[in-house]
Every structure is written in structure tokens, then in C-alpha cells.
């Protein structure tokens, strides 16, 4: 995650100074997108029709990836396009390394800002990429369908629509070539919501969804049986030294399967502390610590499920703790590096989940990025990741990634 996502439509602004996700008429204060280069991007030229002003932007990104998994095969899919902790193979025989190339992270967005007859402004944003869409292949055309990343309006302190969860802190994400960067330890989620922001405080009601582990283990069950939204509250404080955010979430986990005799719900909760500390005008440390029960789908790209079905058909929320630390160093005006560590630990009850579910994951990454021009970047990143399941079987992932990106 990089400054390009927080500097669209802003001139010479440091990443993470804007952490609220509110749009004004001429500047975008929403931390959006996952990208690649740390850029300061001038505001886009605006086109006005009547009372509405339109702007657009995005970037084109190429990724070359060489991945080696010595403990099993990492099959073609999103785990080959970017790092997904739960997909690191364990306990098997490795095959030869795999090379992949794609431009699926490329994206574009449109913004609008309208002055209303009541004297207030309403703004909107819609953004697409092709990163995780299932439609497409690599045989002939490499065509992939666009998917909605953000689609929301902002009015009078409210956000209505889909964007980053209020439980997430974009400011803590590292400057990484990978799609997320500190994936094991980070909260990462976009979904429909209603959010209200007043000063440093924000509160939201967000789309619920439950992920369930069957009794004894097995394929993940995704349940949409919730009767109430996920509720979050966040306090964000920013100053010249950096920023810090404290967020809490409370949610219902529900699952109905009458054929299997299951009709139950339980509660989930979580706490997140995250932020960025400026060591100097060019160097910084970014961090996050997240813990709770029943928040598996929010952390590490849903490595852990929210709950497990017990023998009597009731649901037990699964505890998880995750953390990440990243250090960014600017060698000079053109070159920079980032050192990233992230991990998560899941407290599974093996008597309920079986031994095949993930017990813990971690990864360490380092990169070297060359800023050839304000809108052009090249970089290389090395990553080593590990995964262990409850039975004790483990596995590693080693990856070299080269990326190039042009921002417009």
C-alpha cells in the first residue's frame, strides 16, 4: 500500500495526512486503492458540467513474479498474483518455481462534486480494478472483468456506499509492491456501509457476513444469515509526527442450516491500534496490532474463519491476534526501501476444527524502489512467508517481484 492511494487529486501531500475518507469539492480526502509507488501527484484537471465538477485518474501497473513453494504446489489463482497467507502450501512436495506476469492491479476512478441549492456540496467516487475477478484466462486474450473497489457518496459528514471498512487504518499500510504488503497482520476490508465522521471520531454500520468452519474441519462456509450490521467506532489523531488510530468493532456471527440442524448466532468483537510515526521528513515507521474474537474475515484476507460449529450445532467464535511493523527509508530523492514484518496467530480449538486449519502465518519482505519521475516508478521486492496448521505441518513461500507503474 502506498502514498499514490492517498494522494490522488492532491498536490505535494504526504501519504496518510488524510485518513478520514471524506471528499471535498476540489480535493480527495479518501484513502483509496492499493497501489505501488510513493508519489506526490498533482491534482487532475477538472471538467465542469452545470453545477457538477468531474475528475478522473488511476494507474497502469505491471507485475512480474517468481514464486517458489518447497512444501507443495501453489495453484494458479490469486495466490500467484499477490500474497495470500492462507494459500501457502504445507506438508507436501514442492515443485519447480513458477513465473507469472499480469497487469490486473491497474485501475481507474471517477469523482464528482456538486454544489447543491441548499449551499452544501455532495461528492461521489467510483473506482474499478481487475485484481481478483474470476472471469478471464491467460491462454489468448488475458481479459479480466472490472470489479468495483469503491462506490460511495459523501454528504454533510456522512458516507453512503462501498469503501474501506471504518475498522481499517489505511495509514498503517506499508509502501510495498505487493497488493497489500503487511497482509498477515493487517485489517483489510472494503464493503457497503453508512459512516458518520465528526472531527477525529467516526462511527459506521457495515455489511455483515460470517465465515464458518464446519465441525471437524472442511470447506469454509460463507453465511449471509446476519440480522444486524457490523458496528465500528474509530478515533484517529494526526499531527506533524504522524498519526494513530484506535478502532473497535462489534458484530453478530450467524449461521442457519436447517438440514444439518444448525441455527445459531454468537458475538464477535475486536480492537485495533495502528498508525505511522515520522522518524524524519523522509523516514517513518508504520504499525498495527489487532486482536479479538470472531473477526477472522477482517484480518489477513480471511485466513481464519469467524467461528466454528460445535458438536451440538452451536457457534464458537475463534480468537485471533495479528500485528505488523514496517520501516521506510529514503536513500535519496529517487531511491527508497521498505522493511516489512507481519504475523498472525489463531487460537483454534482442534477438537472442533480438526488439524488442517491454519494456526499461524508470518512474512518478511524488503524492497528497493526507484522513482524515475513523479509519475513513473520501478521496483523489486523479496518476500519470505511461512504458514503452520494445527496439526504441526508447515510450509514456506519465497517470492521475487518486479513492478513498474505509471500514474495518471
Image (tube, rainbow, N blue to C red):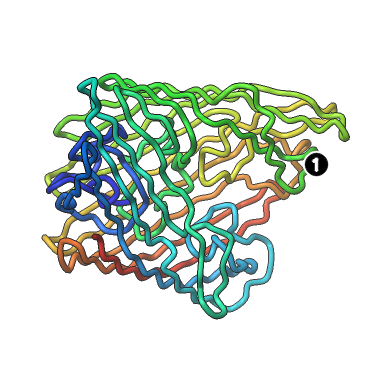
- The quarter of the image holding the C terminus is bottom left
Q: Quadrant of residue 242?
A: top left
Q: Which residue is mark 1?
A: 216
Which residue is more in the foreground, 215 or 222? 222
Q: Quadrant of residue 365?
A: bottom left
The image shows residue 189 at horizontal and vertical percentages of 47, 40
Name the residue at 41% across, 68% down. 103
The image shows residue 124 at horizontal and vertical percentages of 33, 38
Name the residue at 43% across, 31% down. 167
Q: Secondary structure at mark 1?
A: loop
Q: How dense is the environment of label 1, judged by Cα within 10 Å: few (below 14), some, or many (20 and up)? A: some
Residue ranking furthest to the front: 50
Which residue is more in the foreground, 336 or 263? 263
Horizontal relation, residue 40 to residue 208: left or right: left
Name the residue at 51% across, 45% down. 300
The image shows residue 9 at horizontal and vertical percentages of 20, 47
Q: Looking at the picture, does residue 16 appear above or below residue 154?
A: below
Amino acid at each position: 500500500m502506498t502514498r499514490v492511494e492517498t494522494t490522488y487529486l492532491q498536490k505535494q501531500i504526504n501519504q496518510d495526512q488524510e485518513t478520514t475518507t471524506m471528499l471535498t469539492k476540489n480535493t480527495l480526502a479518501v484513502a483509496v486503492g492499493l497501489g505501488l509507488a510513493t508519489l506526490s501527484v498533482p491534482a487532475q484537471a477538472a471538467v465542469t458540467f452545470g453545477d457538477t465538477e468531474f475528475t478522473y485518474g488511476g494507474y497502469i501497473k505491471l507485475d512480474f513474479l517468481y514464486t517458489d513453494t518447497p512444501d507443495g504446489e501453489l495453484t494458479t489463482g490469486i495466490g500467484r498474483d499477490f500474497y495470500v497467507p492462507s494459500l501457502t502450501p504445507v506438508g507436501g512436495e514442492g515443485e519447480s518455481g513458477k513465473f507469472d506476469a499480469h497487469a490486473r492491479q491497474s485501475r481507474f476512478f471517477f469523482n464528482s462534486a456538486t454544489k447543491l441549492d441548499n449551499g452544501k456540496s455532495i461528492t461521489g467516487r467510483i473506482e474499478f480494478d481487475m485484481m481478483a475477478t474470476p472471469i478471464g484466462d491467460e491462454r489468448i486474450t488475458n481479459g479480466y472483468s472490472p470489479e468495483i473497489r469503491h462506490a460511495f457518496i459523501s454528504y454533510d459528514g456522512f458516507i453512503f456506499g462501498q469503501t474501506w471498512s471504518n475498522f481499517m487504518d489505511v495509514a498503517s499500510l506499508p509502501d510495498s509492491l505487493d497488493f497489500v504488503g503487511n497482509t498477515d497482520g493487517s485489517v483489510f476490508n472494503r464493503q457497503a456501509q453508512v459512516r458518520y465522521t465528526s472531527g477525529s471520531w467516526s462511527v459506521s454500520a457495515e455489511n455483515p457476513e460470517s465465515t464458518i468452519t464446519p465441525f471437524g474441519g472442511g470447506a469454509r462456509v460463507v453465511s449471509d444469515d446476519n440480522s444486524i450490521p457490523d458496528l465500528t467506532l474509530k478515533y484517529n489523531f494526526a499531527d506533524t509526527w504522524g498519526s494513530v488510530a484506535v478502532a473497535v468493532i462489534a458484530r453478530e456471527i450467524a449461521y442457519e442450516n436447517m438440514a444439518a440442524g444448525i441455527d445459531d448466532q454468537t458475538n464477535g468483537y475486536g480492537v485495533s491500534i495502528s498508525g505511522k510515526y515520522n522518524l524524519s521528513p523522509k523516514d517513518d515507521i508504520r504499525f498495527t496490532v489487532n486482536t479479538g474474537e470472531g473477526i477472522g474475515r477482517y484480518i489477513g484476507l480471511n485466513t481464519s474463519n469467524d467461528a466454528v460449529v460445535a458438536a451440538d450445532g452451536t457457534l464458537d467464535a475463534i480468537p485471533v491476534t495479528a500485528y505488523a511493523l514496517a520501516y521506510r527509508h529514503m536513500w535519496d530523492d529517487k531511491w527508497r526501501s521498505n522493511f516489512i514484518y507481519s504475523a498472525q496467530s489463531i487460537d483454534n480449538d482442534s477438537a472442533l476444527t480438526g488439524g488442517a486449519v491454519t494456526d499461524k502465518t508470518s512474512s518478511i519482505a524488503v524492497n528497493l524502489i526507484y522513482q524515475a519521475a513523479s509519475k513513473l516508478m520501478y521496483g523489486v521486492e523479496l518476500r519470505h512467508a511461512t504458514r503452520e496448521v494445527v496439526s504441526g505441518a508447515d510450509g514456506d513461500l519465497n517470492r521475487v517481484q518486479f513492478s513498474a507503474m505509471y500514474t495518471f
